Amino acid sequence: MSSLCFVCELPILSHQTNGVWPPASPSEEALEDGLTIPVLDTTTSGSTYHEDCLVCDTCGLRLAGSNIQRARRFHNKIYCSLHYADVSGLSSGDEFMQKLRDYKRQSLGCAEARRKSSTTLQFPVPVQACPGKEGCEGFPHTIKEIPGYWIECSGGDATANDNNVNFNYSKEELEKKFELISVEEETYEKYFYGTEHWNYFTNDEALGPVILSIKQENVYNRDQFRVMLRTVSYCLHGLVPASCICADRYDREAVVKALGDEAGLKPQLVLGQLSSTPDELIKLDQVFIKTELKVGVVLIKEGQSSEEQILNNVSHTPLFDEFLSVLGERIRLKGFDKYKGGLDSVHDLTGTESVYTSWRGIEVIFHVSTMLPHEEHDPQKLQKKRHIGNDIVCVAFLEADDTMFSPTCIKSHFLHTFICVRSSPSTKTSPTSYEVSVVSRDEVGAYKPYLWHKYRFIKDTLFREWLLTKIVNGERASYSAPKFARMQDRTRSQMLEDIVTNLQNYVETGQMPKPYRRGSWRPIGHMRPSSPLLDSVRDTFEGFEQLARDFGRAFQNNRHLCDVIFNVGQGKEKTRVYAVRAILGVRSRVFLEMLYGFTTGYGPCMVAQGDTGRKDSLIGSIKSSNFLQVPDPHDSVRSKTTSSSPTVFRYFSRLGNWAGWGMGSRSKSPLDAGLKRWQSKEKDKERRQSVTAAEVTLSMCADAGKVDRTKLSQTEFNIIEFDSETFILLMEYIQSGSCMLTCETIPGLICAAEHYDLPELLQACFHHAKQNFRLSVVCSMLNMLENYYWRYNSASELVSAILSYIDSRAAQLFSRREYLDLSESMFQMILGRDLNLSEVSKFEVMLQWANYKIEMSSNIDPRELERIMSRLTRDLKLQKIPPQELIRVILPTKTISNQRILETLLLQADTGMYRIEQAHVEECRVRTNTESSDSYSWDILETKISYIEDDT
């Protein structure tokens, strides 16, 4: 029997080069000053190893051949002497200093290798790869052998591996049993972040940006320096004893200079003095430590081998559904607020459902081929390939006995590793059993857990943990492939350059750096969030966010700083709301007209409520527009509104000089005509070109003569269109630039936004509402919109959006009690739509709603129920209700007249919808006319109908 390698725990086959760990292995090592390292390797497992397994577990350095003397064994893992110090805490320092001297050559070599094409590079074959027919009885493990790919071996003896024993592992035991691959980006956070350390930087003439992090440690009573040196393409980390550095150990600058000289860095390293540098370095590392993954999943049936056949599957089988439940939970995409992996959660453009799981702090979304949009006329199925083809790992579920999987069945430059899970449709077991195979591109190394230890599973917690660990490790192992390494280098280069540039600027000028652009640093495969703001606009905006908040907070609820009062509400009970006239005039064209009497020419001038009882209206000449679309940043601006960029700084710059806009001051001050707030971008541009250098004599107004001095002196205005809560929220938005949006406040706020011509608030309300529709809130929203939807286009469009949302969810809505609170007009509006409900179900819903209204009403008129049902059932299609249900369900309620029911039965008999003897209907009519309620007649008719139908 072949022996096992103590590193990978796989058998050593005859064709594989192997060796025996030397008895005189450096488990004890004398240091320069005579200190003896204690024996730390307490493992007693075998000493045989694959030569290809002699690779440093930390840095990946190959230690076979001439490097064997640098290999260290610790707990059955192999490390180079440098990283052996990290796990054992002991180091002689020579290894690190040698690597430091070779740092520049190694870094430039890595950068050069990344630039080469994968086709020109040779990759070592992992020891876990299947040796082929000669060395493995199980070859090819149901995988087609394709050049450029290697198949992971699961052993030749299938029965020896079939150990489907259901062990009860705890969560901690499973995490320890199935470990995730560690990455070098975790080093800084593990050893430096949160502790006292120093960051030095330089911009080397050959390497570009370089950052050195250093801290002092004391290990076994020896002073050591922990050093991390990073460039774009290479990172070096290790411990070096203070005695190995030719400098005064108590002079940090001298120590750093010595390290820089050893590495050959020019110019010299300089201390970074920005306190934000550790956080920025953590951001840099976290970009490459992905906690959000997207994974493809395809269903392959018997005989399917081509891309067209596989992606043409649209229906699920019970076995496939059961397997998807192992991967995660099925989620509804619309309204889903967690990681979506590029899937649409607003308009259902990428399907309605997907599979998602949150596991060990990692969010995984699965691009399931059968759940993605399917277009019959598209033979290439691009809607599916654009998602699955851009994933790195793909899980192939083979519901077949004899079909083999080919890694080239889906053409993609991104897919690097395939995990094939096979389940037989002909042999059913309980619980369901699975066999796993793995195939990867040559540039992807081996990753745990290995198939040799186990490749047959049953549906249980162990299989789920094994499979998710294999998926995540497969993705992390693929990052070392040249294609992804080059992508990471580009991102790392940009981030390091920004960090070093900011440190250099601070050293030279003392100027604090600007905030980094949001969304510009994203991990591989992540999409940038959609936003109507360009990066340049966002940079300007971020610099003034806090200023805007402070400015708005200073005026909010501070009546001493306000110069105008609004009496909000109808009747005697009014709420007094305080505001600043100048800010309202700047932010809203309608308030400009109301408060200053200034006519802009865009519509009817608002009339202050003051002593007049007239009602404000903005209905005038409203143009139809679709507010349900989030604006595109490149769209042209609509003629009646201001520019679509909500840049706070623009509002401050356009405030100009407020002199002359208070209650008592009438002074005038010059201001460029380009700062007129009420004009649109196009109008503003045209006028700036035509206006000369002549001064304007009133701040913000190009023509002082247009200002109504009577309005300017008026300090109180009545607002009857909106309730006090809506108006207070509106004032908060206008004066501070932001406000809280909820489904309860949006109906009133969206109409106020249209009324006062605030397009940005209007868009924000629609966007928020569309993303947060829920059955629990749509009824209350409809009730609030009842008084607005006939007056405002925005309210009408919001009602239409809510009704469209309800159309496919009517049954669920009417199973909830919230629908009972609907107003009658909104209730009728819902029932009048083309719902997926039978007419008899609609009648039952109407009856429940009417009875609830009677119970809640103080009106005890016995005929009130009949009146309500008469109005509700006016458009009910009784002819679509079967005769038996007309007699059994509707007739006993006495809410629809007997005459109408008889007419419906006659119509059904005449049109042949049902076989009913007309003589029986006429007899029932006569008896009903003579006897107010003859149940005997209806029972006979029902019996006749049933008899005739049974005979048919």
Image (tube, helix red, strand yellow):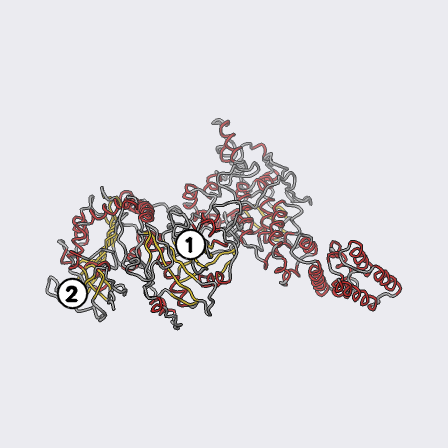
Q: Secondary structure at mark 1?
A: strand
Q: Residues within 10 Å of mark 2 (few under 14, many from 20)?
A: few
Q: Which residue is identified by label 1? A: 294
The residue nearer to you, when weighing 864 against 43, is: 43
Q: Which amino acid, mark 1?
A: Lys
Residue name at image x 78 percent, y 63 percent: 948
Q: Disc 1 or 2, which lies upstream in sequence?
A: 2
The location of residue 87, given as percent across then percent down, is 23, 63
- Disc number placed over residue 86 in the picture, else none: none
Asked whether residue 152 appears in the rendered view, the answer is yes
Q: Which amino acid, mark 2?
A: Pro
The residue nearer to you, when weighing 19 against 529, is: 19
Location of residue 613 with respect to 700 vertically, above or below: below
The residue nearer to you, when weighing 762 against 901, is: 901
**Quarter where residue 291 is shown:** bottom left
Asked whether residue 193 appears in the rendered view, the answer is no
The location of residue 227, given as percent across then percent down, is 22, 55
Q: Nearer the viewer, mark 1 or mark 2?
A: 2
The location of residue 823, given as percent across then percent down, is 68, 56
Q: Secondary structure at mark 2?
A: loop
Quadrant in which the N terminus appears: bottom left
Q: CA distance from mark 1 to mark 2?
A: 45 Å
Quadrant in which the C terminus appears: bottom right
Lateral position of residue 836 relative to residue 202, left or right: right
Q: Which residue is identified by label 2? A: 22
Lateral position of residue 176 relative to residue 661, left or right: left
